């Protein structure tokens, strides 16, 4: 008997499996090395890529929630946790007092700089592991093809070493 050709639902299940495996692997590595969750790493990374000193280019909390694909309440809890650790700061929009911006502190940038290699290594390990599974190998190949594309010329902000 031949196996049925994978359908859209099976393909989605494989993609979801790949994502879950990668995220779990990264989560373990970031927690072990830096006491940082994968979501916290994502928040720091997204906010660190904001242009420095340009108020209109800072994320408001609702924009950050959208960028992270999280609810506003989950984003607020995450930002509160990072702010309590001194990794983020919030400030009012000078032109609209209802707007609140969030930015990475120097301490947050230092932690992010230390965590990036851990994240990258864990991602590479998880992809290599997933590549050995026939159902996931084509997805890993697609991810690697995306990585081969030229990246936009955007450098993270420098870390103040003091």
Image: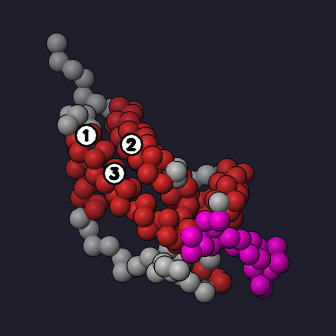
Q: Position of residue 85 (x, y in %)?
A: 65, 60
Does 36 sit left or right of 100 as displayed? Answer: left
Q: Magenta segment range?
A: 86-107
Which residue position holds label 3? 123
Contact? badges 1 and 2 (CB < 8 Å): yes
Identify the mark nearer the N-term, 3 or 1: 3
- Answer few, some or many: residues within 10 Å of disc 3's Cα (few below 14, many 20 plus, some between 14 and 19): some
Contact? badges 2 and 3 (CB < 8 Å): yes
Q: CA distance from mark 1 to mark 2?
A: 10 Å
- Disc number placed over residue 129 in the picture, else none: 1
Q: Residue furthest right?
A: 97
Q: Is residue 84 above or below residue 96?
A: above
Q: Quadrant of the N terminus?
A: top left
Q: Residue furthest left?
A: 1
Which residue position holds label 2? 25
Residue found at x 36% / y 76%:
152
């Amino acid at each position: 008997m031949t196996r049925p050709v994978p359908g859209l639902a099976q393909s989605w299940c494989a993609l979801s499996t790949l994502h879950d495996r990668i995220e779990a692997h990264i989560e373990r590595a970031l927690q072990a090395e830096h006491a940082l969750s994968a979501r916290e790493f994502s928040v720091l990374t997204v906010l660190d890529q904001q242009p420095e000193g340009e108020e209109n280019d800072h994320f408001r909390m609702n924009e950050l929630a959208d960028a992270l694909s999280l609810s506003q309440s989950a984003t607020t809890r995450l930002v509160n946790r990072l702010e309590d650790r001194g990794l983020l700061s919030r400030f009012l929009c000078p032109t609209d007092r209802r707007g609140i911006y969030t930015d990475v502190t120097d301490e947050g940038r230092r932690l992010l700089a230390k965590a990036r290699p851990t994240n990258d290594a864990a991602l590479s390990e998880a992809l290599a592991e997933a590549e050995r599974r026939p159902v996931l190998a084509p997805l890993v190949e697609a991810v690697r093809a995306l990585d081969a594309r030229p990246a936009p010329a955007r450098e993270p902000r420098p870390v103040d070493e003091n």
